[in-house]
Amino acid sequence: MFAACASGGSSAAVPSDPVLAQGQQIYVQNCASCHGQAGGGGIGPKLAGLVEKRYPNIADQEAVIANGRSSMPKFSSRLSAAEINAVARYEREALGVK
């Protein structure tokens, strides 16, 4: 969820669920530079396949996105609650899922 870190890799297929597609777009624009295109980590921690275990309650994950943590910036001033939910769902339901 950072905006100024390096990442690489090819773009993933767009999910058919419109909320997940929106979440993917938000993730690519705001998160992938630190967490990796596929959520494999980098400057930010790995998210793929782990975020749901770290945050069983999606509201806790949304709070981290909204309020930031450590060097991660807060996104509550840039993203709406619906957008924060979309990116949280994308991280939970699409990253690391084959």
Image: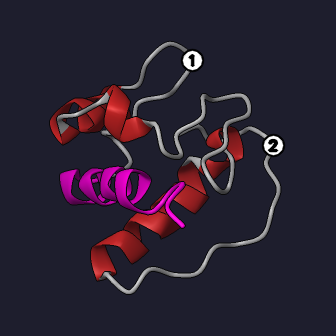
Q: Badge 2 is on which residue?
A: 6
Which element type, helix, strand or loop, lies under badge 1?
A: loop
Q: Nearer the viewer, residue 3 or 40?
A: 40
Amino acid under disc 1: Ser
* Left or right of residue 40: residue 52: left
Above or below, 33 relative to 86: above
Residue extending furthest toward the front:
98
Expressed as whole percent of the image width and height from the top left, the position of residue 29 reads 58, 59
Task: Tell whether label 2 touches label 1 (CB within 8 Å).
Answer: no
What range of the chain is rendered magenta?
Answer: 80-98
Q: Is the magenta region chiefly helix, strand or loop?
A: helix
In percent of the image, x 36 and y 70: which residue is there?
20
Residue extending farthest bottom: 16
Tell me the crowding category of disc 2: few under 14, some 14 to 19, or many 20 or more residues within 10 angstroms, Cα based.
few
Query: In this view, which residue lies farthest toward the top?
Result: 70
**Image height check: is 20 above or below 38?**
below
Q: Residue at x 40, y 30 (%)?
A: 74
Q: Is residue 60 above or below residue 24?
A: above
Quarter of the image with the C terminus is bottom right
Q: Earlier in the sequence, mark 1 or mark 2?
A: 2
Image position, residue 41 (x, y; %): 67, 37
Magenta-drawn stretch contains 90: yes
Q: Residues within 10 Å of mark 1 (few under 14, many from 20)?
A: few
Q: Secondary structure at mark 2?
A: loop
On screen, residue 15 above or below 78 = below
Left/right of residue 73 with respect to residue 77 in the rendered view: right
Q: Which residue is mark 1?
A: 71
Give the residue type at disc 2.
Ala
Write the residue at 48% across / 66% down: 24
In the picture provided, is 66 more to the left or to the right than 15? left
